[in-house]
Image (cartoon, grey):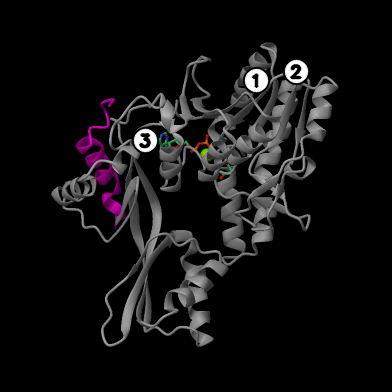
Amino acid sequence: MPVLVMKFGGTSVATLDRIRRAAKRVGVEVAKGHDVIVIVSAMAGETNKLVGYVDETSPLYDAREYDAVVSSGENVTAGLMALTLQEMDVPARSWQGWQVPVQTTSAHANARIEAIPTDNITRKFAEGMRVAVVAGFQGVSPEGRITTLGRGGSDTTAVAFAAAFGAVRCDIYTDVDGVYTTDPRICDKARKLDRIAFEEMLELASLGAKVLQTRSVELAMRYNVKLRVLSSFEEMDDAAGTLVVPEEDIVESNVVAGVAHSRDEAKMTLVSVADRPGIAAAIFGPLADAGVTVDMIVQNISEEGRTDMTFSCPVGQVARAEKAMEEAKARGEINFHDIIADTHVAKVSVVGIGMRSAAGVAAQMFRVLAQEGINIQVITTSEIKISVLIERKYMELAVQALHDAFELEKAG
Ligand code: ADP
Ligand code: ASP
Ligand code: MG
């Protein structure tokens, strides 16, 4: 029978009642003749609570134990979803990541899926089971320890299962009815898109639009998974939601497709480092080893052989970054006068494949921010995006002003 993957995010399984509503949707797809793989997240708020416990216990935690703790939220939902389906007379069974097994790298807290053997679940389908409920976000490392895939990782679990099982589609059920031109929670003029190109979705996701985890979009693109984002709160409708599709299937043509924001950024500056060949490697090597995900980088002009090096990273990684830099200094690999961490910045980005051929988007973006009196601290660009780092209190204003200026409320 054709396999369908249905993923339910945290708000869609936040209570027993919502789990029942989600299970009813699954039941409808089973009745239509699908074997269904359901991927579940932890109940809303659970993962944050577990992360909080870990932070409080051990601020520079051992990531293996972080994974042991934070993966547990999904286990509860998987069991409850299987029980709910059984109560509805739908033959269902739950799987934790290690039972499948979802084989991942050993990069704890940020592991990548390497393989998903299909035999266990396929055999169960052949024996008459109709729904495999799989705990999202988790896997098992080559060393046999539990791993997690990074925040929002259940999306990636879902797409990886769709690819492994050759699913007819991967439906991502969430608390909004699709992908919007920007986060509908901070801009009431945000418009729902019927389709979005993989490339644009990939940029929006990596720049902070958390509706899909970046890696899930990467995988869908690579394995040609039919990916749809839709609401678990609305009536069932085969045409609902947003399809993420190859560029050639896009009919709309706004130069800017969307605006993304990332709230919890920090800007760190190493004051007065020696400006010599190898200095960037000496700084960013230890940061990478410490698991700091550096995003924007600026090296200022140097005076008398010394320069300031500025980079951005997630706010939650500032303590790790400082520690890594102090240790590199103690080892004599780098030298700096001071480290300054500004933890009140945010990143706002505009994204669109139309920017490849349209000039002036950057100039317009900077003009709009200037008109709002917003100072730009760091800028980065690529072929299809422009990002700026600004003071966090202006983030919503910047998103709304850019959404207006690029007329995203209108279809192109
Ligand atoms: P889930 O728990 O279902 O995985 P998430 O909270 O991870 O849900 O993702 C859905 C949220 O993503 C929405 O509630 C919305 O606030 C946010 N979001 C950010 N950018 C966008 C966008 N461009 N389109 C839709 N939602 C977005
Ligand atoms: N529960 C995990 C998180 O909150 C994974 C997910 O929901 O996708 O990040
Ligand atoms: Mg999510």
Amino acid on which disc 2 is placed: Val
> Which part of the image, by quadrant, shows the N terminus?
top right
- What amino acid type is highlighted by mark number 3? Arg
Q: Secondary structure at mark 3?
A: loop
Q: Is residue 229 above or below residue 115?
A: above
Q: For the C terminus, which image quadrant?
A: top left
Ligand 2 quarter of the rendering: top right
Q: What residue occupies the far left of the structure in this picture?
A: 371
Instruction: List x then y, in percent, for residue 240.
Output: 47, 19
Which residue appears farthest toward the right when viewing the image?
127
Q: Earlier in the sequence, mark 1 or mark 2?
A: 1
Q: Which label lies toward us, 1 or 3?
A: 1
Identify the residue at horizontal 70%, vertical 31% (top origin). Answer: 165
> Tag 2 or tag 3, which sits nearer the N-term?
2
Provide the residue span drawn in magenta: 390-412
Magenta part, dominant SS: helix
Q: Which residue is mark 2?
A: 90
The quadrant in which residue 308 appears is bottom left
Q: Is residue 359 left or right of residue 107?
A: left
Q: CA distance from mark 3 to mark 2?
A: 36 Å
Q: Is mark 3 within 8 Å of ligand 1?
A: yes
Name the quadrant containing residue 97.
top right
Tag 1–tag 2 contact (CB < 8 Å): yes
Circle 2: element type: loop
